[in-house]
Amino acid sequence: MTDPASDAVHGRHLRGPVSGPIGRRAWLVGVGAAFAAGCLRDAPPVSEGASLARLDKVWGVHGIAGERMHKPRAMAIGPDDRLYLVDFTARILVYDTDGEFLQSWQTPDSKSGRPTGLTFDPVANELLVADTHYYRVLAYTPDGVLKEDRTVGGVNGKAPGEFGFVTDAVRDSAGCLYVSEYGDNDRVQKFSPQGEFLTQWGSHGTDELQFKRPQNLLVDPQDRVWVCDACNHRLKAFSPDGELLFSWGVEGSGPGELYYPYDMVMDPAGDLYVVEYGNHRVQKFTQAGESLGVWGEQGSGPGQLWSPWALVLDSLGRLHVLDTQNHRVQRVIV
């Protein structure tokens, strides 16, 4: 499967930081871009919904060196609210929540492709990197030192412990590791804290127990494993052993509908914020799938998004949205 971020049309980028609230409602009113890659199809017509948030800050400069970013495609938040991004140059970029650049480093290999998933594990105090096209999960210290003994995978295949294209990796409260893959496998594998294979579930397809690009994982306070089943336009939740608990989502662009959900985060109240790559917006849901509002519209101005890939919540409850094709981050108050 071709990576959608490699072929999607580019939006214009903001050349300097912009901050301040936006006093208008931001609706997704149309999707004019045509996408020719992966499982992405032209977006359906868009309907309006309840307002979700207001813009607080926009920052990011397009480029391939230093603090500049080029098509950032995953994001995690770590100690002291540091933001970790990985962009299309396979660099891990670290900023504070105001966009002040702190440091960067390069992943070991990138000729075959770039990482598409980041998670910070606060218990192990390490950044997990889904090194997608090298079929493995890398682990780094918060300051960018590769922990080679913590690498999981590295072999392409369908057997337990082997991987297809890795999209994300998360740990539960017991330290068990869950890894999602797309391609021929389209599954989730579970490993012990010591890296031993425990179980797996899922396959490629559209049935209730199948996936088409499980792009992002989330382990909630109850150790349920949530999956963004991106190309099936739905979210699913599983027990730690892979029993399906929830499955909801309808393809579309109206309130309560989804179009390529790529990432999600859960707030302290238990509600879910979902970023939709195909709808260029963020939508908030209850755990039962009831829409509580939307934010964003297609474009390149402040408060607009172009093919966003990821989002995180900081310690102050502010939402940071990775505006991929605009090469920037937008912070909103929800």
Image (cartoon, rainbow, N blue to C red):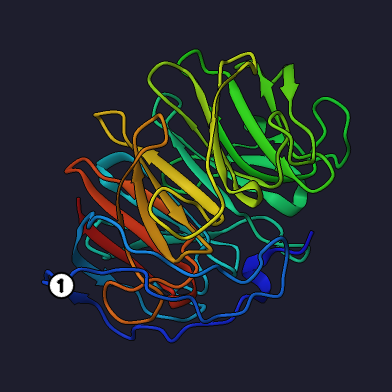
> In front here: 308 or 329?
308
Count of numbered badges drawn on the protein = 1
Residue 291 percent location from the top left of the image: 34, 44
Residue 59 percent location from the top left of the image: 29, 72
Q: Residues within 10 Å of mark 1 (few under 14, many from 20)?
A: few
> In front here: 171 or 126?
171
Q: Quadrant of residue 207?
A: top right
Q: Is residue 9 left or right of residue 189?
A: left
Q: Residue at x 59, y 81 (%)?
A: 9
238 versus 150 height, above or below: above
Q: Quadrant of residue 90?
A: bottom right
Q: Residue at x 67, y 22 (%)?
A: 190
The amino acid marked with disc number 1 is Arg
Q: Residue at x 25, y 45 (%)?
A: 314
Residue 328 percent location from the top left of the image: 38, 71
In this figure, which residue is indicated by the disc labeled 1? 24
Secondary structure beneath label 1? loop
> In front here: 246 or 142?
246
Q: Quadrant of the N terminus?
A: bottom right
Q: Is residue 303 left or right of residue 202?
A: left
Residue 223 percent location from the top left of the image: 47, 18
